[in-house]
């Protein structure tokens, strides 16, 4: 793709600093790219709103500063897209839901403020499953996003708009959020890099809550290097998020070139079941062999509670969601039903008309699992299993494992409509990703090859707050694959 915006941050920055391109050219290319992606049939539908012309002033200021040789922020003039569950002041924040129709946040998320402070152009807000509940972006109130590799397929979800925007070359980087895989699974389906940082690494202030003990913001990018750079911009403690970690923010890219010699990579047998798709299993094997070939010590490991991860995740996530979503009452935000005749009717009608089917399903299941007499049996049990899953990982890291390698998703991108009527089948798309959220660990998906032209991601996990090692291993693998792609026909 020859679009200006289809490069990496480094390439775009070099273009700007050398004077070959202006920030105004980048903005124009991005807007043209979005318009083209909407004009083609069927439309990509990656964006819910676009800032467009409103950025002209900011772009002029960047171009003037560049012309004057001033020192600029690390993202000066770089167009970025933001998932539409992250609050911005200029653009509406819909969460992909009709219940937030017309809502413009009076405040800005910490990550949006940090991106702007680094000089980034916040180009637009990307499509998502309603309130991030889903794995295909088909649960959006604004129509599904399509996969740029095959428009009859889903981009994954819930950060499908962000993944598709990066994969289609409309922006070099985007932000997503990940509660059970919503950055990594769409990254896998769209052939881009998706990083979920350690819980607490990035402030959630201004991220609309889905399941507060699992949610985390992270970047979708074209390269591991760009993921490291984006994380350096958005990470750090924030007094507006009491769960953000008060730890120094290192240069996450400092060991991208350090190789994997002497590191131990664990391959958990529970993530390679006998019925795993052959193509995915074989691409994962090749990736592991590459790591071994470059000096990593590869060990088979066991994470014995993996089989309970999906039920534990859905119990915890739905319970927290039912509580977080109680605030959408038809009074304080968005959609209002003017004809309602009583207070209860205001709530009932706004929630009835404003929420989609999946969100309603989760509110009902979550409320049930929290109710008196059931709390211990459901939510309490989910939390106990969560601790066992976290302990599995603690044990392998205590045995000297530096990174764990798994498939990101059990399949390539599936067809639109294929799973919409089968919520359990949809939930199973997350079997390999929910554990990182339950255990609060950092995890990344990088492209490891293709099956019949469709991208496949491999997932790496590392110790809490050790994104530097995570990115080191990911970058080493990424470069080995770039130098000698795995998806040649045998
Ligand atoms: N697909 C999972 C769910 O539906 C994860 C979503 C997410 O990470 N936001 O809950």
Image (cartoon, grey):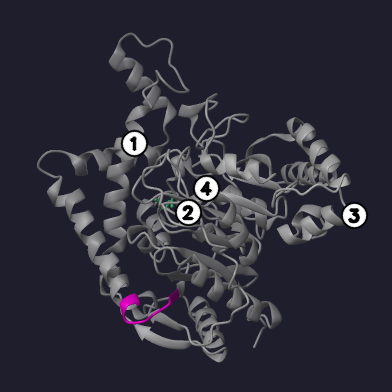
* 204 and 486: which is toward the camera: 204
Q: Which image quarter: residue 108?
A: top right
Please give the residue where the numbered disc 3 appears in the rendered image: 20
Tag 2's secondary structure?
A: loop
**Residue lying furthest left:** 373
- Residue numbers of the magenta segment: 397-405
Tag 1's secondary structure?
A: helix
Q: Is residue 433 above or below residue 70?
A: below
The residue shown at (20%, 44%) is: 369
Q: Is residue 253 above or below residue 246?
A: below
Does the magenta segment cover residue 20?
no
Between the residue at mark 2 and the residue at mark 4, the CA separation in whole angstroms equals 10 Å
Q: Which image quarter: residue 192?
A: bottom right
Number of marks in picture:
4
Please give the residue where the numbered disc 4 appears in the rendered image: 137
Looking at the image, is mark 2 or mark 1 earlier in the sequence?
2
Please give the residue where the numbered disc 1 appears in the rendered image: 324
Mark 4 vs mark 3, foreground winner is 3
Between the residue at mark 2 and the residue at mark 1, the CA separation in whole angstroms equals 18 Å
Q: Could you say where residue 302 lies in the image, as x and y percent from the top left?
A: 31, 79
Q: Which image quarter: residue 15?
A: bottom right
Q: Is residue 139 above or below residue 480?
A: above
* 170 and 338: which is toward the camera: 170
Q: Could you say where residue 238 lies in the image, as x and y percent from the top left?
A: 45, 43
User: Would you say residue 46 is visible in this rendering?
Assistant: no
Q: Quadrant of the C terminus?
A: bottom right
Q: Could you say where residue 63 lies in the image, as x and y percent from the top left?
A: 84, 42
* 263 and 427: which is toward the camera: 263
């Amino acid at each position: 793709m020859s679009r200006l915006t289809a490069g990496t941050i480094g390439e775009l920055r070099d273009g700007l600093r050398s004077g070959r391109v202006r920030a105004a050219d980048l903005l124009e290319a991005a807007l043209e790219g979005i318009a083209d992606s909407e004009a083609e049939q069927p439309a990509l539908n990656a964006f819910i709103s676009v800032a467009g012309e409103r950025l002209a002033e900011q772009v002029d200021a960047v171009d003037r500063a560049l012309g004057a040789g001033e020192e600029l922020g690390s993202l000066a003039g770089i167009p970025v897209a933001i998932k539409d569950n992250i609050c911005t002041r200029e653009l509406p924040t819909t969460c992909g839901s009709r219940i937030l129709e017309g809502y413009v946040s009076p405040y800005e998320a910490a990550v949006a403020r940090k991106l702007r402070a680094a000089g980034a152009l916040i180009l637009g807000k990307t499509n998502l499953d309603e309130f991030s509940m889903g794995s295909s972006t088909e649960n959006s109130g604004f129509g599904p996003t399509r996969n740029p590799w095959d428009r009859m397929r889903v981009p994954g979800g819930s950060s499908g708009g962000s993944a598709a925007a990066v994969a289609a070359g409309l922006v070099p980087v985007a932000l997503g959020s990940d509660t059970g895989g919503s950055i990594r699974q769409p990254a896998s389906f769209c052939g881009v890099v998706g990083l979920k940082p350690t819980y607490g690494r990035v402030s959630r202030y201004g991220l609309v809550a889905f399941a507060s003990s699992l949610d985390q913001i992270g970047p979708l990018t074209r390269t591991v290097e760009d993921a490291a750079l984006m994380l350096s911009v958005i990470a750090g403690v924030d007094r507006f998020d009491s769960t953000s970690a008060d730890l120094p923010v290192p240069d996450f890219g400092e060991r991208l070139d350090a190789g994997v010699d002497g590191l131990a990579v664990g391959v958990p047998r529970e993530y390679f079941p006998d019925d795993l798709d052959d193509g995915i299993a074989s691409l994962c094997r090749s990736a592991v062999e590459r790591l071994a070939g470059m000096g990593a010590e590869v060990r088979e490991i066991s994470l014995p509670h993996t089989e309970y991860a999906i039920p534990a995740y859905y119990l915890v996530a739905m319970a927290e969601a039912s509580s977080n979503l109680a605030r959408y009452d038809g009074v304080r935000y968005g959609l209002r039903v003017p004809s309602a005749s009583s207070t209860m009717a205001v709530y009932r009608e706004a929630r009835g008309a404003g929420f989609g089917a999946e969100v309603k399903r989760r509110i009902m299941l979550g409320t049930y699992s929290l109710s008196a007499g059931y709390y211990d049996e459901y939510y309490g049990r989910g939390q106990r299993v969560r601790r066992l899953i976290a302990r599995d990982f603690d044990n392998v890291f205590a045995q000297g494992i530096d990174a764990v390698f798994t498939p990101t998703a059990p399949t390539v991108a599936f067809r639109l409509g294929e799973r919409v009527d089968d919520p359990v089948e949809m939930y199973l798309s997350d079997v390999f990703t929910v554990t990182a959220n339950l255990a609060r660990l950092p995890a990344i998906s990088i492209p490891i090859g293709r099956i019949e032209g469709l991208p496949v991601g491999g997932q790496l996990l590392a110790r809490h707050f050790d994104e530097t090692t995570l990115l080191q291993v990911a970058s080493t693998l990424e470069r080995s694959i770039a130098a000698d792609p795995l998806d040649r026909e045998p």
